[in-house]
Image: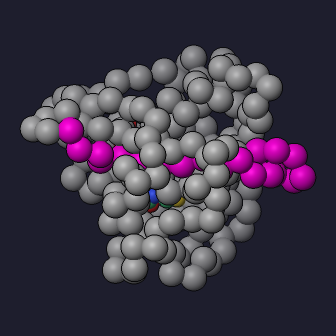
């Protein structure tokens, strides 16, 4: 689960739940660059059912360098988690932080068997390979989201065995 050593050495980081306020600056910088800050706040972020997660490096001082959010939504009329705002700071990509964030939230979901075990997202095309590496499947044609570019819709059905194997 810990971020691996690669591209220049170990990263001393922790993954934990976070508040929207904690992650919004990173989400804004990575995913809504050049747009007003409020565009990085998504409808539903404030709901009690929404879950925000952060990857925090410890050195030289605590700093949030990765984030992701789950909104309780629907997939084909069944409850499902919509994954949103997945971002690793450009300075910290390729060190396993994105992987660690997804594994952390998947373990939390699996820990509550009554919670939906289905996830979906609108994945930016350049990030689709990342999600595929993490067990997600492309389930749509490419489509355009204004201001965010080309996307695929992707899904992941959680199974306890998958998460154990990938950890
Ligand atoms: C996509 C993103 C979140 C990945 O984060 P990251 O912390 O660099 O990812 P990791 O280092 O944990 O990578 C995990 C695995 O995915 C692979 N991977 C990462 N980004 C990838 C990409 N764009 N395409 C294909 N594979 C990718 C890595 O090689 C690694 O595989 P490995 O363990 O087999 O070597 C990051 O590149 C990012 O923030 N991009 C810009 C914002 C964005 O597009 N977010 C997604 C919006 S839908």
Give the colour scheme shown: one colour
What residue lies at 62% left-to-right and 78% top-to-bottom? Answer: 144
Residue 95 or residue 57, whichever sits in front: 57
Residue 12 or residue 8, whichever sits in front: 12
Q: Taking the image as drawn, is residue 75 in sight? A: yes
Q: In the drawing, does residue 56 fall left or right of residue 116?
A: left
Q: Taking the image as drawn, is residue 30 in sight? A: no
Q: Position of residue 124 (x, y in %)?
A: 53, 64
What residue lies at 87% left-to-right and 53% top-to-bottom? Answer: 76
Q: Say whether residue 69 is magenta.
A: yes
Q: In the drawing, does residue 125 fall left or right of residue 117?
A: left
Q: Position of residue 134 (x, y in %)?
A: 54, 38
Q: How many badges with numbers are in the image?
A: 0
Residue 25 or residue 75, whichever sits in front: 25
Q: Position of residue 10 (x, y in %)?
A: 19, 29
Position of residue 61 relative to residue 86, above or below, is: above
Quarter in which the N terminus is drawn: top left
The image quarter containing residue 15 is top left
Is the stretch drawn in magenta largely helix, strand or loop? strand
What residue lies at 47% left-to-right and 62% top-to-bottom? Answer: 126
Position of residue 164 relative to residue 29, above or below, is: above
Chain part drawn in magenta: 62-80
Q: Kindly give the residue lying farthest to the left in the view shown.
A: 60
Q: Say whether residue 144 is magenta.
A: no
What residue lies at 65% left-to-right and 29% top-to-bottom? Answer: 109
Q: Kindly give the residue lying farthest to the right in the view shown.
A: 77
Q: Position of residue 74 (x, y in %)?
A: 80, 52
């Amino acid at each position: 689960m810990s971020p691996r050593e690669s591209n220049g050495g170990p990263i001393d980081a922790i993954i934990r739940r976070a508040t929207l306020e904690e992650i919004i600056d990173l989400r804004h910088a990575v995913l809504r660059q050049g747009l007003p800050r409020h565009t990085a706040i998504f409808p539903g972020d404030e709901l009690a059912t929404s879950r925000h997660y952060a990857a925090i490096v410890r050195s030289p001082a605590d700093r949030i360098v990765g984030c992701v959010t789950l909104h309780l939504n629907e997939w084909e009329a069944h409850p499902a988690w919509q994954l949103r705002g997945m971002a690793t700071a450009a300075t910290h990509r390729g060190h396993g932080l994105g992987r660690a964030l997804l594994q952390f939230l998947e373990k939390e979901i699996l820990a509550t068997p009554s919670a939906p075990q289905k996830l979906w997202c609108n994945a930016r095309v350049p990030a689709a390979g990342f999600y595929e590496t993490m067990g997600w499947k492309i389930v749509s044609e490419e489509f355009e989201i204004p201001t965010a570019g080309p996307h695929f819709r992707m899904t992941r059905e959680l199974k306890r065995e998958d998460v154990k194997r990938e950890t």
